[in-house]
Amino acid sequence: MKDFTVNPDFVIRDEASLRSLFQATHPLAAQKCQNSLDIHAQNFIRRSPFLCIGTQNLDGRADVSPRGDPVGFVEILDQRTLAIPDRPGNNRLDSLVNILANPSVGLLFVIPGFDDTLRVNGQASLVTDPELLKSMRVNERTPKIAIVIKVTEVFLHCAKAFRRSHLWDPDHFQDRAEMPSLMNMILDQTTGAPSDGDEMRKLDAGLEDEYKTTMY
């Protein structure tokens, strides 16, 4: 694939140039931003089993990480404070290391079947308070860390992106078998996947077994 180069004549370099391409913001879009979690935001969070958290280090390297758990896994500590349990992962710790360098985070809460989402921005810290962590136990396993977020901005996000993508429409679901397994792709990208189909199936089964034992 040939490298793509952006023509500098078509690069937007300032906010005025950007805004000139769009109509003015609808008053409701500006007014809907809250600085605390009202009843609707709290109800949305309590229904959500999934979120994405966006972080950035001091050099500007950005990262977005998915977080999922049983419905209502994010604890609402008060109208301006949330706590997210950190479950076992790949131990890259990208989000956590970024938070240490730059506490500003953005959250996107998703509810299966809902086309609208909830966005929350704030300042995060990594907390090891035993009482807080104990309240987040699942299957008798306690997280090592919670991400505690002081909320600075909250607003509901419209349904356009989810409706354009048909995310929840079964008629638009794709067949997972049309791509290699996760383990196969990662091995292709690193040490090389085995050509023997039986060996690859054993590796895939091993990953499924690991999911069962290390989810929490």
Image (cartoon, helix red, strand yellow):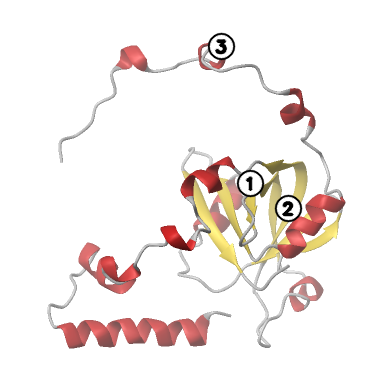
The type of residue carrying mark 1 is: Val
- Estimate the x, y position of residue 12 in percent, counting from the top left: 44, 17
Q: Earlier in the sequence, mark 1 or mark 2?
A: 1
* Mark 3 vs mark 2, CA separation in Å: 32 Å
Relative depth, front residue between 34 and 54: 34
The type of residue carrying mark 2 is: Ile
* Mark 3 vs mark 1, CA separation in Å: 26 Å
- Estimate the x, y position of residue 11 in percent, counting from the top left: 38, 18
Q: Which residue shows up at 58% across the image and 47% down it?
A: 101
- Mark 1 Cα within 10 Å, few/some/many (few <14, many 20+)? many
Q: Kindly indicate the quadrant of the structure image that contains residue 142.
A: bottom right
Q: Are marks 3 and 2 in contact (CB under 8 Å)?
A: no
Residue 6 shows up from this direction: yes
**Residue that carries the numbered disc 1 in the rendered image:** 105
* Residue 16 numbered tag: 3
* Mark 1 vs mark 2, CA separation in Å: 8 Å
Relative depth, front residue between 105 and 72: 72
Q: Are marks 1 and 2 in contact (CB under 8 Å)?
A: yes
Q: Are marks 3 and 1 in contact (CB under 8 Å)?
A: no
Q: Secondary structure at mark 3?
A: helix
**Residue that carries the numbered disc 2 in the rendered image:** 149
Question: From the viewer's perspective, is the residue at label 3 or at label 2 nearer?
Answer: 3
Q: Which residue shows up at 56% across the image and 16% down it?
A: 19
Q: Is residue 83 above or below residue 71?
A: above
- Estimate the x, y position of residue 7 in percent, counting from the top left: 28, 18
Q: Kindly indicate the quadrant of the structure image that contains residue 192.
A: bottom left
